[in-house]
Image (cartoon, rainbow, N blue to C red):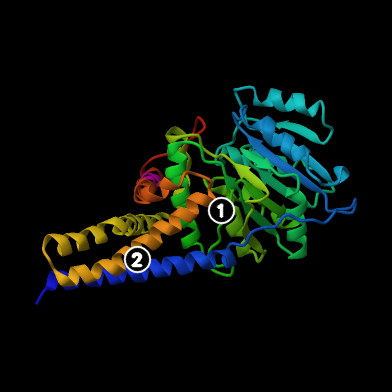
């Protein structure tokens, strides 16, 4: 009895079943993670009043391009305000914003006082901004400084939120990936998040921090950012509390309407992701389970065909030769899935072959994130949080 060959056949068939499941899940993502199409409608002066709040800390390289893209929105000027909240920047960010504000009446600058205990810098800035918006503001739109907005962004987002009676609409941006670290890690991380995301009627919720459009009365009803002031992943925490109070929350792809370059290389990718992976993945236990599943699942794409080839060509096992067919089919499907991802992210296709390294590095980031959360302090932009 050739137990070795039978084991190889079993593993190959199991890998084929897993790959088939991954493909089905990928095809289903469009249903649970729909795209927001650019709106072709023309908003009138009766459009809801929107205040865009941009929290910034040491964003001198980003803030001007972000703000200019917001000031070019195809949205009625009388119904739009842009408020940049400077969180004690030391690199001249506030001066850049102040200069732009002198040219654009719709743009205002707010400087935060020293950070109080028990709040993160971003939550503090967002909360102060929300308290300083015009009285007739109906929607609050929180946007990160690394976002670049298409002219149709706000009109399309507000129209969708109003039409579908949403209380929070979050849009995932198109990621601008330039460095090796970004191209290796972020596609794998976003794949993982997409596959672990539950449907919108599930118990958990996922949002994308760079863009949150929130109905003002819903925001105030749950206490806004003050209610989640100590949360490292304040976007996820705020979405959860809104959903717990019965408000309607939805995440969509904003690929056609906004882009963002969140990180610039290893020195920003690692700390940027590690600081909030625990919260994004649902807590330490869920994060650890995801990490320990991701590593072996990624490497089987190469290890199982290699094992079958060794048994077939090296040992002459007929069962191992037969097992090569499902193993290679499954691995081809997995690589094809990541080729599609590389094309989507507009990066060289050969990165699709490196996906086991990407998931492995991501898993190490998860372990570091758990370690920081349980035994250390989270550090970000010159501050340490317990």
Residue that label 2 marks: 329
Dot 1 corresponds to which residue? Answer: 236
Q: Looking at this rendering, what residue extends furthest in the bottom direction? A: 1
Image location of residue 258, percent across then percent down: 66, 46
Does residue 257 appear to the left or right of 40 in the view shown?
A: left
x and y percentages locating residue 374 in the rendered image: 38, 47
Considering only order in the chain, which callout, 2 or 1, is on the residue closer to the N terminus?
Answer: 1
Classify the position of the N terminus by image quarter: bottom left
Q: Nearer the viewer, mark 1 or mark 2?
A: 2
Residue at 81% x, 25% y is: 102
Q: Secondary structure at mark 1?
A: helix
List the single residue furthest toward the right: 45
Dot 2: what SS? helix
Q: Residue at x 34, y 66 (%)?
A: 329
Q: Which residues are magenta?
A: 365-369
Name which quarter of the figure residue 247 lies in: bottom right
Of residues 298 and 45, the one nearer the viewer is 298
Left or right side of 376 for 55: right
Q: Is residue 278 magenta?
A: no
Q: Quadrant of the C terminus?
A: top left
Q: Vertical placement of 177 versus 318: above or below?
A: above
**Residue 243 at x, y percent in the picture:** 62, 63
> Is residue 153 or residue 223 the one in the foreground?
153
The structure residue drawn at horizontal position 73% and vertical position 65%, both measured from the top left corner, is 164
Instruction: Answer left or right for 201 relative to 365.
Output: right
Mark 1 burial class by Cα count in 10 Å: few <14, some 14-19, many 20+: many
């Amino acid at each position: 009895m050739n137990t070795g060959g039978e084991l190889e056949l079993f593993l190959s068939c199991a890998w084929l079943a897993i790959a088939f499941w991954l493909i089905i899940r990928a095809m289903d993502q469009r249903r649970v993670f729909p795209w927001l199409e650019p709106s072709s409608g023309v908003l009138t002066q009766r459009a809801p009043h929107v205040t865009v709040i941009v929290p910034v800390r040491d964003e001198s390289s980003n803030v001007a391009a972000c703000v200019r893209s917001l000031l070019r929105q195809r949205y009625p000027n009388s119904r739009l305000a842009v408020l940049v909240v400077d969180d004690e920047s030391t690199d001249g960010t506030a001066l850049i914003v102040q200069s732009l504000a002198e040219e654009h009446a719709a743009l205002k600058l707010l400087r935060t006082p020293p950070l109080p205990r028990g709040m993160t810098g971003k939550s503090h800035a967002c909360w102060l901004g929300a308290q300083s918006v015009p009285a007739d503001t109906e929607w609050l739109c929180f946007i990160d400084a690394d976002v670049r907005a298409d002219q149709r962004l706000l009109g399309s987002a507000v129209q969708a939120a109003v039409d579908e009676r949403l209380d929070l609409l979050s849009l995932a941006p198109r990621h601008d990936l330039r460095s090796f670290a970004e191209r290796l890690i972020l596609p794998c991380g976003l794949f993982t998040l997409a596959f672990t995301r539950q449907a919108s009627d599930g118990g958990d919720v996922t949002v994308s921090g760079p863009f949150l459009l929130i109905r003002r009365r819903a925001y105030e009803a749950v206490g806004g950012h003050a209610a989640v002031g100590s949360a490292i992943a304040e976007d996820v925490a705020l979405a959860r509390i809104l959903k717990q109070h019965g408000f309607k929350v939805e995440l969509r792809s904003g690929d056609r309407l906004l882009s963002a370059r969140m990180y610039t290389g290893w020195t920003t990718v690692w700390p940027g992701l590690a600081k909030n992976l625990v919260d994004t993945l649902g807590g330490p236990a869920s994060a650890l389970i995801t990490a320990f599943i991701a590593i072996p699942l990624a490497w089987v794409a190469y290890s199982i065909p290699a094992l079958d080839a060794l048994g077939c060509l090296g040992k002459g096992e007929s069962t191992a030769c037969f097992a090569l067919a499902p193993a290679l089919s499954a691995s081809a499907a997995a690589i094809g899935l990541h080729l599609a991802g590389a094309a989507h992210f507009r990066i060289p296709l050969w990165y699709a072959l490196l996906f086991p390294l990407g998931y492995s590095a991501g898993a190490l980031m998860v372990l570091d994130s758990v370690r920081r959360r349980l035994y250390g302090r989270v550090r970000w932009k010159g501050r340490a949080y317990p």
